[in-house]
Image: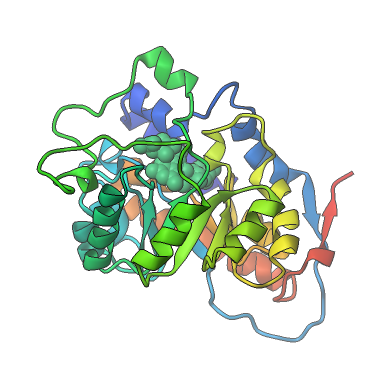
């Protein structure tokens, strides 16, 4: 892990209410997948190419993954995260504690809207219109959550509601006045993806793909991209690390749409490994929350800056290009 990220996590742990720290840090079940997401990177090594004789560009293929309830981390919540982007894309959660229009207005980079499809499609449509009107550039439908994950840390703390004064603001006054809970439903299907495609001209990504056949289905249903993700180990605690699931999805998609990855990315080297295995970009979840809790927008900026600097350094050391033949297992 990049030491700056470790330092920001230490600072966040010191300032956060322990219940909120554990909400952010925790995973589902025994937290096997939570640990595996990071461990998978340590099992791989990069074989750099040398003497390639070229300068590298400044492209930084990183997005901020959608995470809920930023006001639990910092009073400015998602506004602080949005201010820190300087060109990086923020995927803003349905469960944002700031309305999406305000997030976009504060943003210094593109904002995409993460959508939990609501079984009442009138409510889903109202969310989509809200995201469109706010100026979001894409929708990211989270597909790995037919039901809420069971997080033992939250159950042990009895944490199931936001404190008074905080709410999932995007869920306010949809269809009818008042605040709705976010529903998760196993009835959500590819048919909903088709309906969303008819409903909006925004590019539609699907997040939470692990099985190559689902990647194939996603392409068949006309998505603009897929995100290989296990929700940071917060849903099914039986799945592979995101990184280990990536190559088969990349093969199934075969270049037809971009394949992003999130889960366990904690250094510039991790970004390079994911790209070498075929990811077009990576998403960062918890480290952004640690930066936000530690130091608001400055902390988030620091996370992005150290990852950018480290990634470009690793890329230069690798000869400026990354490909699957450069990845080997550590013995
Ligand atoms: C506290 C927390 C809240 C999250 N909330 C959402 C969410 O609202 N929507 C979603 O699609 N994913 C959510 N995720 C999953 C992240 O988008 C992402 O997949 C994951 O955090 C990536 O792993 P990382 O934290 O190891 O970088 C959440 C993750 C965390 C840690
Ligand atoms: C509101 C929650 C369901 C957000 C989430 O996806 C998570 O905590 O992992």
| Residue nearest the observer in this picture, 289 or 125 | 125
| Residue nearest the observer in this picture, 151 or 331 | 151
The image quadrant where one finds the C terminus is: top right
201 to 25, vertically: above or below: below
Residue 19 in the image, given as x and y percentages of width and height: 35, 22
* Residue 271 quadrant: bottom right
- How many numbered badges does the structure rendering display? 0
Residue that appears at 63% across and 67% down: 313
* Residue 247 quadrant: bottom right
Left or right? Give the position of 13 relative to 210: left
178 to 114, vertically: above or below: above
Picture colour scheme? rainbow
Residue that appears at 64% across and 52% down: 214
Left or right? Give the position of 96 relative to 222: left
* Residue 274 quadrant: bottom right
Left or right? Give the position of 187 relative to 225: left
Residue 35 in the image, given as x and y percentages of width and height: 63, 33
The answer to whether residue 285 is visible is no
Residue 62 in the image, given as x and y percentages of width and height: 51, 62
Residue that appears at 38% across and 47% down: 117
| Residue nearest the observer in this picture, 25 or 231 | 231
| Residue nearest the observer in this picture, 43 or 317 | 43
The image quadrant where one finds the N terminus is: top right
Residue 191 in the image, given as x and y percentages of width and height: 48, 54
The answer to whether residue 219 is visible is yes
| Residue farthest toward the right in the current orientation of the protein | 331
Left or right? Give the position of 286 relative to 75: right
92 to 231, vertically: above or below: below
297 to 108, vertically: above or below: above
């Amino acid at each position: 892990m990049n030491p700056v990220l470790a330092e920001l996590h230490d600072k966040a742990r010191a300032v956060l209410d322990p219940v909120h720290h554990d909400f952010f840090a925790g995973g589902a079940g025994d937290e096997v997948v939570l640990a595996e997401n990071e461990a998978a990177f340590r099992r791989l090594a990069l074989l750099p190419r040398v003497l390639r004789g070229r300068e590298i560009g400044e492209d930084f293929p990183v997005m901020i993954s959608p995470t809920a309830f930023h006001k639990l981390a910092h009073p400015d919540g998602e506004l602080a995260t949005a201010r820190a982007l300087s060109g990086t894309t923020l995927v803003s959660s349905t469960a944002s504690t700031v309305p999406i229009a305000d997030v976009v207005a504060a943003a210094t980079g593109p904002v995409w809207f993460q959508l939990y499809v609501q079984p009442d499609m009138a409510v889903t449509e109202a969310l989509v219109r809200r995201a469109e009107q706010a100026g979001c550039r894409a929708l990211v439908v989270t597909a790995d959550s037919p039901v809420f994950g069971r997080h033992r840390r939250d159950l042990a703390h009895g944490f199931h509601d936001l404190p008074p004064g905080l709410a999932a603001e995007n869920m306010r006054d949809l269809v009818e006045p008042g605040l709705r809970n976010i529903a998760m439903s196993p009835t959500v299907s590819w048919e909903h993806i088709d309906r969303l495609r008819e409903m909006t001209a925004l590019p539609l990504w699907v997040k939470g793909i692990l099985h190559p056949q689902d990647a194939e289905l996603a392409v068949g249903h006309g998505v603009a991209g897929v995100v290989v993700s296990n929700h940071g180990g917060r849903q099914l605690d039986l799945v592979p690390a995101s990184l280990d699931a990536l190559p088969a999805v990349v093969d199934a998609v075969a270049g037809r749409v971009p394949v992003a990855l999130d889960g366990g990315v904690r250094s510039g080297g991790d970004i390079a490994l994911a790209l070498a295995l075929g990811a077009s970009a990576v998403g960062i979840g918890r480290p952004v929350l640690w930066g936000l809790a530690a130091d608001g927008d400055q902390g988030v900026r620091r996370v992005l800056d150290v990852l950018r600097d480290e990634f470009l350094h690793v890329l230069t050391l690798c000869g400026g290009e990354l490909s699957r033949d450069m990845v080997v297992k550590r013995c």
